[in-house]
Image (cartoon, grey):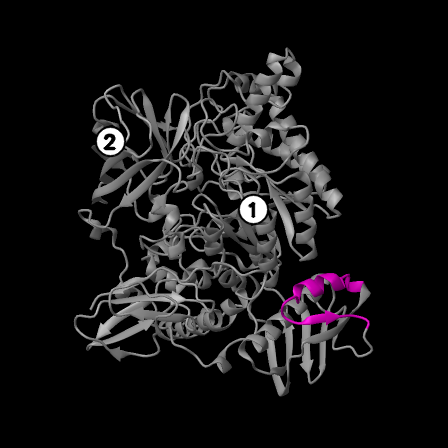
Amino acid sequence: MKKISTLLLFFFLISCSQNKPVIEVIYTINEFNTEDNRINVTLDITNKTSKDISSLWSLHWNQISAKLDKGSLPNNLKYEYVGGQSYNILSFGEDYTLNKGESISFDLKQKGVVRRKSDFPMGGFVVINDEIIDVKFINLWENAKDVEDLNIPTANDRFNNNYSSKLLDKSQLDLIVPTPNKIELLDGEIDLKNKYSIDVDESLNLSFDLIESLMSGVVDVVSNENKIDIKVSFLDTLEKESYILNIENDVISISASDRSGALYGIQSLKQIFLVSQLENTPIKNIKINDSPKFSYRGMLLDISRNFYGPKKIKQILDYMSFFKINYLDFRLTDDEGWRLEIPGLEELTEVGSKRGFTKDESDNLIPIYGSGPYTDSTGSGYLSRSEFVDILSYANDRNITVIPQISYPSHIRSAIISMNVRYQKYMKLGDKEEAEKYWLTDPDDQSEYYSAQGFDDNIACICRESAFTFYEKVIDEIYLMYKEAGVKMKKFGVGADELPYGAWRKSPLCDEFMKEKSITGDYNALYQYQQRRIYDKLSSYGLTMTGWDDILLKLTEKNQSETQIKNFFEGDDILLFVWKNDWGGGRQDMIYKYANLGYKTIMSNSSAFYFDMVDDKDFDNIGLSWSGYANYKDMWTVDVFDIFNDSYGVKKNNISIDYINKSDKLNPNNRDNIIGVQSQIWSETIVSEDILDYMFMPNIIVFSQKAWSEDDSWMKISDKELKDQTLEMEWNKFTNNIGQRVLPMIDNIFGGLSYDLPKPGGVVINDSLYANTVFPGLKIKYTLDGSVPNSNSNNYISPFKINEDDIVHLRLFDNTGRGGNDIKVNN
């Protein structure tokens, strides 16, 4: 999703404090060669410090999209692309002195293309004689040759994409999102009061304190009053998580058969109260009968690539519960960071939770994803044991089940490095037994592999017993944290995605281990042996083992693009997250294959439910696009049980009838094996909380509709023309719900968020300016003098005449006066 202009500092000027002397690097893209996937650049380096640089020095930076072509380097320059995505080191020989005030300049070629501002160099610093000097990057690109080949969408393009967006009267909008199953409007209405007394059936176990906190800032809630305004009752005929909400004159009643249903009834009532409060309208008498479409409605939050603390995590949990999301798949560890304190394994947080400049990673991990030279960025940090216990309790109160995801044996480099440090520490003390107790490495392993993120050292040696001992220890300690929180641990995530082909194949330990255990066949058999041990460990605690569907894929050179299934967990208690679903990639039917084999599955669809996938080719975007370009509509149009029923997605991605016919379909008898959907927020490019807000909201609103509400009517229409017309009509209503009603709520609850404000669309027709937005109801402001619109600029209401020499800029604003990125309209 796109970022607002206030975030441009993170990618346009990556710098330290203005008062601190820096090395300035002007990074200029001279030419885009998208056909050959290359760019030509110039580096202008200026010493703005008070020191002369006369000895050997090196420039360090992170860059996701491109690395230097060594063949383009001038003499006496050495380039190193350090293991792992995006860490670059350019070392300067003796000829490259840089005295204070002086500059040097040279041209380079890079493999890969900068397609958006989050692809620029960031986290830069210079190292000279162990001294660190901050780098300020200034990134220039707009005048590059062939920049038009990037196909950056224009205001006209956006206007056409939003062609179905029409502002609706609020009487046509829904009161609640996600939309309830059944709403019946009754005669009569009442005024919103400032204070409500509430009585809750004790059997529902819904505390007054929680209700009071949920309603805080909306209405005051009191208990033990003679007159009861809100009655929450037990009704055993309702299904789990379901509720009935009645408002009739001065009587408000909520019925549910369990705590979760009662909680969701309160959340829906809160939305009704907010509509009345924010729109200054009475509350209509109403009857709502509501239940979820899926029992599993999840979101993955990755705090390993970049870290966010308890306060932010709790705010996200609040919004998740508000939109009836009931699972947090908590990615606590990855190659780039270990984010949870594990008693007895202090090195995991002393070393593995920090990123910064390092010579040998004995103190912290290498800088990645713009974390820079110091350990005070979002690249560093962890949750203490007590903080995690508190988060478990907080989530449980809001009917959110937390699944701890500790990837093993892949994506575990942070632990490997940490346990290497532990090994060295105890070896120096002469304690070989303790040194090897949790060691994850075979030092004689000559296996060759390359992970999806560019690592060749991020896979644990599963043939070393100490590796299993390590993972057992982590499971045991996390189980104790749940126990202390008073929360039943139900599921444990092993991750295990993107295991690269080639791991363990040249490990002497593995050769010996396979002989000792009589493991015959290839390394798939070895991996299955390890997976079974992990499964048995989790089963001993009564836990469901969750993991990416990679755990059932045959290990081949296709890696995560493989489609061959190893059906060896048949009948076991596992839950598969099926994720790699890029359009036309041959894997969109994988979830149906698993479901037809009897496996319980979750659709995690990377081409629709990955919030970090950018929505288009706009240069102001932040995020990635390896699974295509996924906008809000791409998420809303997904048909979970028939992916090719999505006529919008099929047309947008040019999917052929032949491709569809060759794909596996879901057997109707196995429909119940798809138990839910999950969205994902991966944090590679999330270097601030503002960017996290952007990825999260309003994505989570759209996703909640997919997870909770019944399918829209367009999905059931066979006539193509009528289907497309109905799709656009229903999409317009939903986006009006978001723009006019839901986003203003977000501004007023849980502290608010810096959510995405997409660029408007605009076009000039017959000398008149027309403008629109994907979310009707948000304010489009304009200027005619070429300046960037601000909160005081004129609002666009309807088409109007402009002059030929007017320079039109448009910008979207929320109700608080916060604006998104602006866009110029070609006149």
Closest to the observer, 452 or 294: 452
In this view, 374 is above or below 402:
above
> Which mark is first along the chain, 1 or 2?
2
Q: Quadrant of the C terminus?
A: bottom left
Q: Position of residue 601 (x, y in %)?
A: 56, 50
Which residue appears farthest toward the bottom when viewing the image? 187
Dots 2 and 1: beta carbons under 8 Å? no
- Which residue is painted at 47% across and 71% down in the image? 734
Q: Secondary structure at mark 2?
A: loop
Residue 102 has which mark?
A: 2
Q: Position of residue 619 (x, y in %)?
A: 31, 52
- Which residue is painted at 56% across and 58% down in the image? 671
Badge 1 is on which residue? 576
Q: Position of residue 387 (x, y in %)?
A: 66, 43
Q: Secondary structure at mark 1?
A: strand
Mark in front: 2 vs 1: 2
- Which residue is painted at 69% across and 44% down in the image? 389
Q: Position of residue 30 (x, y in %)?
A: 20, 42
Closest to the observer, 358 or 102: 102
Closest to the observer, 284 or 281: 281
Residue 170 has which mark?
A: none
Part of the protein shown in magenta: 203-224
Q: Is residue 250 highlighted in magenta?
A: no
